[in-house]
Amino acid sequence: MVEPSQPVLKDDDPQHLQDDDVEEMIEKGIEPEDHDMSDSEESDSGHESESETAGVEGQNQETFQDESVQGFFEHTDSIYCIAISPSNSDLCATGGGDDTAYLWSITSGERLSTLSGHSDSITSIEFSFDGQLLATASMDGTIRIWTLQGERVINGDDVKVLEAGSEVLWMQFHPRGHVLIAGTSDSTVWMWHASKGEVMKVFAGHTAASTYGCWARDGKSFASVSEDGTIILWDPVSATPRNRWETSQDDRLSGGDMGWNIIALNSSGMICTVGSAEGKAKVINLANGALLASLETQTDSIEAIVYATTLPLLAIASIDGSIALYEVPSMKLRSILRHDDAVVGLHFEPATPFLFSISTDATVRQWDVRTSTEVQRWHGHQDTILCMAVQRGCKKIVTAGDDKAALVFSQS
């Protein structure tokens, strides 16, 4: 078992915010300190993939390419979610349809811990900002909180179980603390002290499933969307809406009959982009409620939206196989990048011009958004890719999906 090369943050480390500090920061508007977590060193390592001798549907064994450098193959069903620790870049967590999550080494592919206890599929997995906590969310209506010390789970006999009451559809840790928010199929959004296992607030305002949500980067507000077509900017202290948008207020805010399924906030937290199952996207100023743009370039469900951190660009991925790149703030269409099938995930690497994408065409691709060109393409999966995580600095890309395999790809 590889020991992490970086120190574990102590409670009195000035970079670490206690749960109470986070609540005070939200309430008083204190700006959080930015800091970089150190990454542990890792080296490329070959592997003998279980998929190397297996054929892809519609292809023969001789034409199948496996360009992965490592893999993890202990899941027995589709893998729905993946995360890399922000404090140890060799530590990966995956969860899936086998109701189980695993911690494993990206370098060696070795299983480090088996995280069991859920009674239904694990659909979301998240590390806290400091890597000390791992949350696993399930269709069984619970979130389990695992405490980590380096690569080891140290609360295996005392796992905190957060009861959400219905299927958990999304969750996200506070950007600088151990506060966790999550949206459910019964329309409610919950906020917990994850390290204590205590409910802080329950947010009621949607009338149908809360399909997605995210914190503003400063951690002082968050936004969520719903199948009912509502978009809500929340005050996390009072658990009341700071602002709310719905189709009945303005027909231009309609995403279609199925409402909204994804939302992303820009770096200021005051501009949001939402996407619908009908391929519509809207850009809204959360400060004054103004509709800034209606984007209807794509023809099928919007699956991912990401803002670049260092370039004035917005990327939107669709089931129609396209990635639309828009210039910010004009929202002028810059270019369209294409996969051979549905695009289901995007990642903009901070401080670089590189965008990563995954698709049901079983490929992972890297794009240079300055020139709208494909830089690299990786093969290895035998079925739909469902999730992706990228090491800081783009050293490794880890993907997983319906073939029950988590594969590691390296930059050439």
Image (cartoon, rainbow, N blue to C red):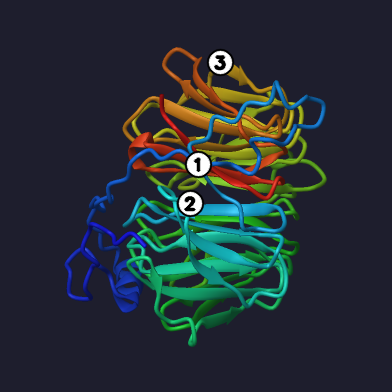
* Kind of residue at badge 2: Gly
Q: Position of residue 13 (x, y in %)?
A: 17, 69
Residue identified by numbered label 3: 335
Quick check: 345 above or below 124? above
Disc 1 residue type (three-letter): His
- Residue 317 occupies quadrant: top right
Q: Nearer the viewer, mark 3 or mark 2?
A: 2
Question: Tag 3, which secondary structure?
Answer: strand
Q: Earlier in the sequence, mark 3 or mark 2?
A: 2
Mark toward the start of the polypeptide (2 vs 1): 1
Depth check, mark 3 against mark 1: the one in front is 1
Quadrant for residue 339, please give it. Answer: top right
Is 16 situated left or right of 366 in this image?
left
Q: Are marks 2 and 1 in contact (CB under 8 Å)?
A: yes
Crowding at dot 1, Cα within 10 Å, few <14 / some 14-19 / many 20+, comes out as some
Query: What is the x, y in percent for residue 408?
Result: 50, 41
Q: In the image shown, does 385 or 44 lie closer to the viewer?
A: 44
Looking at the image, the residue that sits furthest to the bottom is 158
Q: Quadrant of residue 77?
A: bottom right
**Frontmost residue, 224 versus 56:** 56
Amino acid carrying mark 3 in the image: Ser
Count of numbered circles in the view: 3
User: Which residue occupies 44% across, 46% down?
Assistant: 270
Circle number at residue 207:
none
Tell me the distance, in whole angstroms, between the alpha carbons under discs 3 and 1. 37 Å
Front of the two marks 2 and 1: 1
Residue 170 in view = no
134 or 246, which is in the foreground? Answer: 134
